[in-house]
Image (cartoon, helix red, strand yellow):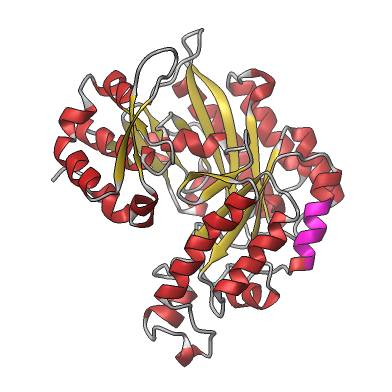
Amino acid sequence: MQRSDESGRRSLGIYLHVPFCVRKCLYCDFLSAPGDDEMKTEYVEALKREIRGQASLYGGHEVRTVFLGGGTPSLLSGEQIGVIMECLREEFSFGGDGVEVTMEVNPGTVTRESLSGYRLAGVNRLSMGLQSADDRELKALGRIHTWEDFLCSYEMARKEGFGNINVDLMSALPGQSPEGWAETLEKVIRLKPEHISAYSLIIEEGTPFFEYYGKSGDGAEAGRLPLPTEDEDRVMYGRTKEILGKAGYGRYEISNYALPGFACRHNVSYWERTDYAGFGVGAASLLGNVRWSNTADMGRYLEFSGERGMETHLKLSVQKLSVQEQMEEFMFLGLRMTDGVSARRFYEEFGESLENIYAAAIDKLVKEGLLVRVEKGADGREDTWFRLTDFGIDVSNYALSEFLFD
């Protein structure tokens, strides 16, 4: 969705992929791998070349959010993060001091010095990958940290002045019970982070977990702790909203909860289809109705000199989205948020009535109790919103599939 400010500049989110990690977790299918200091230095230089080579594509945009993800971005020094951020500010127009700059950090990979460096570079929001407060569960995942490591890193971040911290959690872990999951939630709540992301473990093909659990089903053949049953998973899912809600965390997206005023603006921009620029190996970008991804080949990425054509050397999977594909994305991304989607915004984007285009899907899902219609004003104008019910969120894959064209 093309959001513009009073000057006519369109909003832009920037994603920077840092692919390095200490070691690959057993469930992880992200583009990440260990890297030595020399490779990290080369990678920062390659990022700068790509940023300078692509910045002209976004001349009419103003940066509103930046997200450094991975991998483990906190394996880069404060100085290296500062160099990357300085390059961005040289090449892009930033929206003043209100730009949200998020950086993912893993417990045990930060120091007071590095955290101070990140703050100095302009990072004002941290996303800390805890996953569980139970050391046995962390070990089963292949994580390198303990609960105490997390507490130490979290305390250091607070002392260095970070007032906006997200904690990533994961349920339905090997050996986890609903009571154990509730205990993790309660422990984290007591720390009062501003934001909590709570996802259910997904067994991805190509990971060690797929070998353990995708074939044998319970991990017994590999000597692993069994996964929770489907019923236990559902209990954990229900307790998440209940426990976090009582503590003041509002769910604003299927898996994301925040204290008032602390929703992640960068992720919201994805769900609203705001333009975004992705830099780094494997990073994805969206500009208008065109999406592309960078090469996932690290060697090829590092070789890019800035003089050869981006389209032939870095950009892969270039896709021009049809109007129908854009409509589909508007619906199944927007309906992930608890506010839902705006009929007025749909019309402004596509020149068509949402209720006409999706009349059959809306009628079916409303009758099934999965979707509700809400009349509310926005910007001083009447508007109609459609959002999933709690039951609709529970079966969101089914509900969202109704908005795909045949």
Residue 268's spot in the image, x, y percent? 49, 36
Residue 254's spot in the image, x, y percent? 45, 49
Q: Would residue 128 appear left or right of 24 to someone viewing this image? A: right
Q: Which one is in front, 174 or 297? A: 174
**Image height check: is 137 above or below 265?**
below
Q: Answer with the quarter of the image where residue 159 lies.
A: top right
Q: Would residue 385 appear left or right of 224 to someone viewing this image? A: left
Asked whether 328 falls inside the magenta stretch, the response is: no
Q: Going 62% across and 51% down the picture, which residue do you hit?
A: 246
Q: Is residue 401 visible?
A: yes
Q: Going 83% across and 52% down the picture, which residue do you hit?
A: 155
- Residue at far top of view: 7
Residue 182's spot in the image, x, y percent? 61, 66
Q: Is residue 23 visible?
A: no
How many numbered discs, if any? 0
* Magenta part of the chain: 148-155
Main SS of residues in magenta: helix
**Image height check: is 311 above or below 222?**
above
Q: Going 63% across and 45% down the picture, which residue do you hit?
A: 248
Q: Which one is in front, 11 or 280? A: 11
